[in-house]
Image (tube, helix red, strand yellow):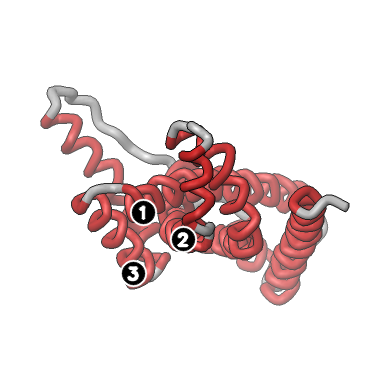
Amino acid sequence: MAGWAQQFGHALVTTCLLAICGFVLALVLGSLGAVAQVRGGRISRYISIAYVECVRGVPEILLILFIYYGGGALITTFAKLLGYGSRVDFDAFTAGILALGFVSGGFAVEILRAAWGAVPRGQSECAAALGLRPVKAFVLVIAPQMLRIALPPLGNLWVTTVKETALISVIGLSDMVRVANVGAGATGQPFVFYAVVGLLFLALAHVSNLVISHVEMRQRRWSHPK
């Protein structure tokens, strides 16, 4: 393990950045998908449902490989149809963000849709009675209540996203698993290197759970002041 601490440090930062960016993208896709299912038209609703079913039915590793090898070619094809001839290629980090965001976004759709559905319909009616426009009513009345309901499952989704960063090593990203693979091959000590990666993931999950618990506690205090 001597001399590998710096590589693991860089890989840990890469893993954290990958998880954060992927989770933010997942929240964006999840929000769009939830809006499409709850308030969208028939076509947008079917697209959102198909997206969720794709994420549920196709293994994550295949989605990662498809986005890395086929995503750039697909965008390049559309660009040529629009008159742009430049080729689009994704590096491993960008492809990892897109893949994690796409996969986690499918689960975020269901979380946010269910949280939206759990808000009593009377809340929207009261907001309308007060003269609030639909967007303002959503931001001020519906969204805070959705957050209270969705926060625990979103916390679990975050931890899952962190663990799924390990899959991105298959496309060559220098994350913790990739460094462990290289170190294990170079030193002949696979158990040591993979044990270190496991402990680092456990530490990330533990810190994440502490932060999530703190946020949930503050949110409960805000929702139910003394």
Q: What separation in Å lies between label 2 and label 1 (alpha carbons)? A: 8 Å
Q: Earlier in the sequence, mark 3 or mark 1?
A: 1
Q: Which of 94 and 150 is in front in this view?
A: 150
Q: Circle 1: is it few (<14), some (14-19), or many (20+) Cα within 10 Å?
A: few
Q: Residue at x 57, y 53 (%)?
A: 146
Specify the label residue 117 is tagged with: 2
The kind of residue tagged 2 is Gly
Q: Quadrant of residue 220?
A: bottom right
- Tell me, yes or no, whether the two marked residues, 3 and 1, touch with CB atoms within 8 Å: no
Which of discs 2 and 3 lies nearer the camera? The answer is: 2
Element carrying mark 1: helix
- Tell me, yes or no, whether the two marked residues, 2 and 1, touch with CB atoms within 8 Å: yes
Q: Which residue is drawn at 54% across and 47% down?
A: 142
Let me know if residue 209 appears in the view: yes
Taking the view exactly as shown, the residue that stands out farthest to the bottom is 191
- Where is residue 188 shown, x and y percent of the image? 67, 72
Q: Mark 1 points at which residue?
A: 38
